């Protein structure tokens, strides 16, 4: 490794360790703005585009939303395609934690401008971050930063300090493109002048693309800037994101050339490849499980032996083949998948085997020799189109050991409401989440799904609560990793959910796209890769 490659490698390693230095290699080493121009159009058909408001704190920036948002907005902290922090990729070119761990200082890059020509400054960072902490804000991935945050100080136009009530050693990750949308920086003056509704109609960012057209429930058309500080001259003049919920329509658009890129389900991958199209996969992207709700109630799943029995009753290998078309693998315990080994997960754990005989024995020991009745929910979701079939298959396996799971269709939003209201006592709820590798991200999702104080928890276990609380309060990265490993083993030993496995996310393209690294960042399939030269 020599020259610039070596220098960039060192910078990324230091970023990962939180020891930031000013970047040595500038991304501006691209053709001069006048040498080349963006040309042509890239058309992307997705099943979900969200509210199309371009404001990260008004909706959860997941799925298709992040795909277009990260072309419009830059992040405070940059990230590499493989999910590491990058001092060359964000508005902040350097950041540092104070010795007492009660503040973080960010030094901003000069010369970055919004689409209206105004400079990106500390005032914009202050406005964007403080907006995340408003009571009505949707910022679900802030985790421990939310409880630790005290104030944000502007020291000068290019220096901001985030003051904390308690340490938050992973804070830069929360405002990076490796996670969700919380790190996106919006123009304070413009937003305050026009308000949220006005901004949604006339959004401005500092990314490589600006919004040209926005038709709610239909499409978003982006137009390239001539030259971007990080990405240079974008490859395509326009990038259009089309809302196409029906997969058959997306496939037809790919065949006719109306779409260059489409989201494709796992079961359709073989036929799409056979038709001569390219398929690019984000391997093991989602972890899938069936949650046993409200284990604190007097219901069968309150007994650990019952939960273990339900795990043993299901053939996960078969589900991967026949429900998910072989596009995935079983893993030991949701929400921690194979990515999590880097974040402290227990690499020695193995998925629960398929053992219906042992499952029946455990049910007898728990006092249910004739099984019991429950509900399993079925709903429609863009990121897991196989979910209704998964519910049916799980119900079939459970019936073989005497457990009757009545399939209950319900709208996803209504189901989420009932989940928060704690009215799903003992019910089975299929769910999925993106795979995570950073220890605090793993601790945060375990907290959201298992801490007794969480709105979405299925458990109320003081021992597990203590592990989570200790991880959030820790000031040592290695200790957080160790605690993640303990959480992993604890959830596994207590069989707190029925983990099915992790599955791939797939996109099909025409010949316009010959290479695509979908990366390892959360809720992001790396559309920036497609627009780079």
Image (cartoon, rainbow, N blue to C red):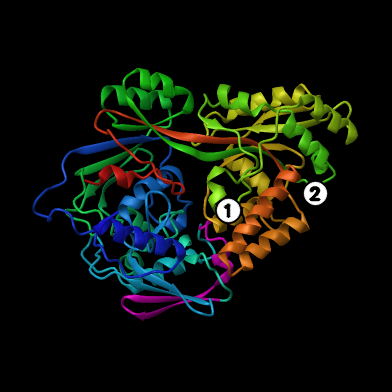
In the rendered image, residue 456, in percent from the top left (x then y), is placed at 65, 50
- Inspect this view and state whether residue 434 appears: no
- Check if residue 360 falls in the magenta segment: no
Mark on residue 442? 1
- How packed mark 2 is, by other alpha carbons closer than 10 Å (few <14, some 14-19, many 20 or more), is some
Regarding residue 126, the answer to whether it shows in the image is yes
Front residue of 489/191: it is 489
Q: Residue at x 35, y 63 (%)?
A: 87
- Residue 27 x %, y %: 24, 58
Mark 2 vs mark 1, foreground winner is 1
Q: Name the residue rendered at 44%, 46% in the picture.
A: 520
Q: Give the alpha-carbon distance from disc 2 to disc 1, as whole Å.
A: 23 Å
Asked whether the residues under the numbered discs 2 and 1 touch, taking CB atoms below 8 Å apart as contact, a structural biologist would say no
**Residue 207 % position (x, y):** 28, 56
**Quadrant where the N terminus is found in the figure:** bottom left
Residue 143 is one of the magenta-drawn residues:
yes
Left or right relative to 198: residue 36: left
Name the residue at 20% across, 54% down.
Answer: 232
Q: Looking at the picture, tell me which residue is in the foreground, 511 or 244.
A: 511
- In the image, residue 435 sits, relative to residue 438, either above or below, namely above
Front residue (pair 476, 401): 476
Residue 76: where, in percent of width, then height? 38, 64
Q: Quadrant of residue 312?
A: top right
Query: Is 189 on the left or on the right of 41, as rendered?
Result: right
Q: Which residues are magenta?
A: 139-164
Residue placed most toward the observer, 215 or 88: 88
Q: Which mark is residue 296?
A: 2
What residue sits 69% from the left and 56% below the top?
451
């Amino acid at each position: 490794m020599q020259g610039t490659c070596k220098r960039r490698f060192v910078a990324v390693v230091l970023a990962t360790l939180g020891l930031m230095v000013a970047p040595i290699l500038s991304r501006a080493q691209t053709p001069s703005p006048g040498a080349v121009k963006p040309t042509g159009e890239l058309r992307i058909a997705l099943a979900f585009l969200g509210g199309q408001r371009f404001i990260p704190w008004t909706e959860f920036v997941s799925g298709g939303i992040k795909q277009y948002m990260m072309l419009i907005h830059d992040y405070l902290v940059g990230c590499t395609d493989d999910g590491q922090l990058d001092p060359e990729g964000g508005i902040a070119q350097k950041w540092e934690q104070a010795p007492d761990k009660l503040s973080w200082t960010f030094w901003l890059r000069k010369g970055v401008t919004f689409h209206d020509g105004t400079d990106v400054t500390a005032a914009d960072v202050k406005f964007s971050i403080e907006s995340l902490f408003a009571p009505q804000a949707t910022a679900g991935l802030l985790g421990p930063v939310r409880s630790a945050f005290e104030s944000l100080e502007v020291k000068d136009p290019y220096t901001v300090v985030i003051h904390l009530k308690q340490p938050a050693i992973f804070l830069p990750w929360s405002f990076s493109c490796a996670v969700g949308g919380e790190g996106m920086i919006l123009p304070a003056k413009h937003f305050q002048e026009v308000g949220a509704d006005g901004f949604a109609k006339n959004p401005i960012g500092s990314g490589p693309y600006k919004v040209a057209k926005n038709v709610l429930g239909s499409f978003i058309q982006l137009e390239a800037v001539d030259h971007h500080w990080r990405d240079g001259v974008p490859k395509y003049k326009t990038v259009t994101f089309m809302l196409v919920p029906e997969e058959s329509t997306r496939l037809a658009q790919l065949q006719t050339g109306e779409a260059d890129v489409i989201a494709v389900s796992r079961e359709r991958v073989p036929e799409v490849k056979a038709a001569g199209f390219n398929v690019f996969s984000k391997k093991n992207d989602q972890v899938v499980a069936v949650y046993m709700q409200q284990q604190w109630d007097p219901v069968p799943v309150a007994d650990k032996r019952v939960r273990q029995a339900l795990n043993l009753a299901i053939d996960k290998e078969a589900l991967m083949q026949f429900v998910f078309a072989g596009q995935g693998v079983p893993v030991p315990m949701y929400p921690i998948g194979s990515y999590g080994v880097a974040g402290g997960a227990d690499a020695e754990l193995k998925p629960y085997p398929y053992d219906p005989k042992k499952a029946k024995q455990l049910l007898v020991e728990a006092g249910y020799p004739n099984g019991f009745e429950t509900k399993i929910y079925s709903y429609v979701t863009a990121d897991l189109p196989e979910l209704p079939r998964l519910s049916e298959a799980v119900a079939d396996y459970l019936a073989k050991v005497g457990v009757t799971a009545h399939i209950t269709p319900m709208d996803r939003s209504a189901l989420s409401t009932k989940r928060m209201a704690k009215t799903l006592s003992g019910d089975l709820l299929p769910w999925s989440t993106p795979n995570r590798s950073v220890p605090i991200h793993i601790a945060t999702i375990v907290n959201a799904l298992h801490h007794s104080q969480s709105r979405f928890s299925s458990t109320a276990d003081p021992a597990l609560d203590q592990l989570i609380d200790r991880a959030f309060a820790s000031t040592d990265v290695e200790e957080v990793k160790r605690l993640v490993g303990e959480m992993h083993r604890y959830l596994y030993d207590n069989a707190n959910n029925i983990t099915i496995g992790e599955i791939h996310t797939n996109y099909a393209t025409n010949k316009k796209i010959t290479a695509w690294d979908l990366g390892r960042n959360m809720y992001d399939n790396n559309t920036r890769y497609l627009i780079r030269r």
